Image (spheres, helix red, strand yellow):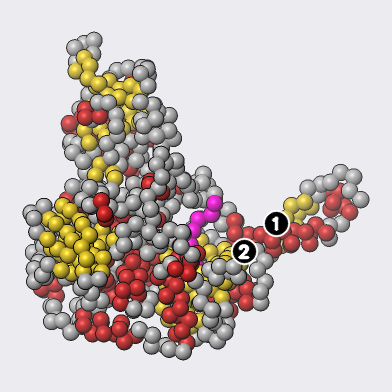
Amino acid sequence: MTRTKTSKPPPAVRGAGRSHTLWTHALTAVLAAAAAAAASRHLSTAALASTHRLAASRSPVNESERLQTEDAPRYAEHLGSYSEYIIIGAGPGGMQLGAFMEDGGVDYRIVERGSRVGTFWETYPRHDQLISLNKRYTSRPREEFDEFNLRHDWNSLLPAAAAAAGVGGRSTGARGARGGGGASPRFTDFSSRMFPAREEYLAYLRAYHRFHRLKVQFEWEVARVSRRRIGDHEGFALQSSAGRFLTCKYLIVATALGRPYVPDMEGIELADGYESVDVREEAYKDQRVLVLGLGNAAFEAAGRAQATAGYVHMIGRSHGGLKQSYFTHYVGDLRAVNNGLLDTFFLKSLDTIDVDTDLEGRNCSLARRVSPGGKPEIDFGCGGGHNPSYREGYDRVIRCLGWVFEDRLFEDAVKPTLNRDLGLLGGKYPALTESYESVNVKNLYFAGTLSHAHDYKRSAGGFVHGFRYTARALYRLLRLSHQGVRWESQRELGSTAARSVALALQRRFQSSSGLYQMFGELCDAVLVRDASATYMEEVPLRFIAHSAFPTSLRLLLTLHMDYGNKGHNGRGDLSFATREVGRAHYSQFLHPILRAYEPSAESGLPSLVSEFHIIEDLLTTWDVEALHLKPLEEWISRVYEGDYTSQEERLTARFKEYEANLTREERRAGAKKVDPYFGAFTFPAVKGAM
């Protein structure tokens, strides 16, 4: 992981320095529970069933009441001043976690500062258009391919029943578990636009709130969070801006990054912030506009001004700050839907983009001045010098430099450590354990965009189509560790035969939306024993490295998806890296990756012994026996036999076989051999070959 320098010693991290046997990692319990499942198939099933009986025993709610026209029905009005779980924020992240808790009969509530859910979306994005895909059609019917279709629906929240149902199949269990009251709302039914309007998303969030009857306490703005003992438990007290109090055992923060980043820069007060900038095109008529920032918000603001402005100049926060998502595969980098100003820059139509100036490193400043013609304007300069590119001055400067976590509401005793304090990538995010818990504040968890601390600049955890899955993983972890309910998406396989296991894995990488969107972060795990195997879905991959290996296991297999080294954060090569099965490990586009682990003799932790790549597939269905299933089955068979030869080693061995069998004429003239599995091998001519 990338680390940055820090000028002060990192704060104490809870649990740091302990041996792995003292760590309380949720997956350790998961694996142990699964390993025991052969002898006790009903492990914690009674606890799980009782919570669903509790949910089913509530008074039935008819469709007309569930979808009432009232924007903000009050389902939390009857609650007292204590809940076991309190979630801060009724945005998509808080609502997704709340839906799972509501369905599971958990004692929870969501506190929201606004009078309706989705307060953030009443203002942002400022220019109204979302950049999240709303792909309504995939040439596959929703009824049969609902899970596959979610890969391309970036806005819908998951149905609550999916926390426990839909294991292994193509459907997520989109029928709600709330007394047969129909399917959980899908955003594809709320907008026909590929890039929808925020008002449409607001309407969707409010429908989701009503359908799932989420317990949201509105107009409850958290002003202060402090430690409060609940019996012998280290809980929390929350004070509102109106002086009211709530207490809880567990606190989950699911807010957005709530405070605009304002650099320590002379004259920055002369800039309009993205959060308050004028969004009318006519406001920029014939003006010279400078935009500070090179992210999506900056290009969004620049694009609005561009239609009427004299010209727009853009400057990055740091050197080389312009990163485009079709090169990096990171959805938070500049999206094509926003990059119209790149056209006018490269086609020399006055607009410019400066990726060399470093706002933070060159002592830049803004200052008022009067032009020679007597016109008031804003001067921009760096390092005390004058850059002739900015000699004309500006009528308006817009600050679009991102957001930071709002931690001022936490008392010092419960103030979470940030990634920057530990020298980690994504410094503005709270530093988290593998279970999304603060590294230094016990029982404080993070959901929604704040869970992006783990995969910043790598995967989709900062966005709805990513954090809906990490919210589900968090819910399962909480149920496991706090209520003893087994992992709520696991099943026993009928056989440990290589083909049976391969088929189970193939069904998942053919359709799973969670693995597809949270690539490199979530994995499926197959726990293989001598005579049985347990399949578990969407376990955080980082747990594997920190969890004790149950002694009853013969082997641990994992499945996750990711890009190749060149395709992810690489140069954006549009061509396929390979079409030969034997070179699948060269795949650059998103593709399945399998790993096999055995216990380390030294530590008892899982030790990686083999990795296997499934060749990239343009259709992303991986349904060709010879290309996708048979190679996987053969790899599992080899691993069962203790053969951990890598794909690269097998490729090299085959090359050497051909090389050893070249004729004298082939060595002298050069040769090309085509292998049906490994593809073409080229042998250059060797002068003087005998």
- Percent coordinates x, y for residue 397 in the rendering: 25, 29
Q: Residue at x 30, y 83 (%)?
A: 47
Magenta highlight range: 559-565
Q: Which mark is residue 276?
A: none
Q: Residue at x 46, y 84 (%)?
A: 36
Query: Is residue 522 placed above or below 261 in the rendered structure?
Result: below
Q: How many marks?
A: 2
> Does residue 272 belong to the magenta stretch?
no
Whole-angstrom CA distance, mark 1 to mark 2, is 12 Å
The reply to whether residue 508 is in sight is: no
Q: Which residue is mark 2?
A: 581
- Percent coordinates x, y for residue 525 in the rendering: 48, 72
The residue closer to the viewer here, 593 or 245, is 245
The residue closer to the viewer here, 446 or 168, is 446
The residue closer to the viewer here, 198 or 406, is 406
The residue closer to the viewer here, 453 or 432, is 432
Q: Residues within 10 Å of mark 2 (few under 14, many from 20)?
A: many
Q: Which residue is mark 1?
A: 680
Which residue is the extreme one toward the top?
A: 372
In this image, 627 relative to 370: left or right?
right
In this image, 243 relative to 111: left or right?
left
Amino acid at dot 1: Ala
Query: Is residue 494 placed above or below 68 in the rendered structure?
Result: below
Q: Residue at x 83, y 60 (%)?
A: 661
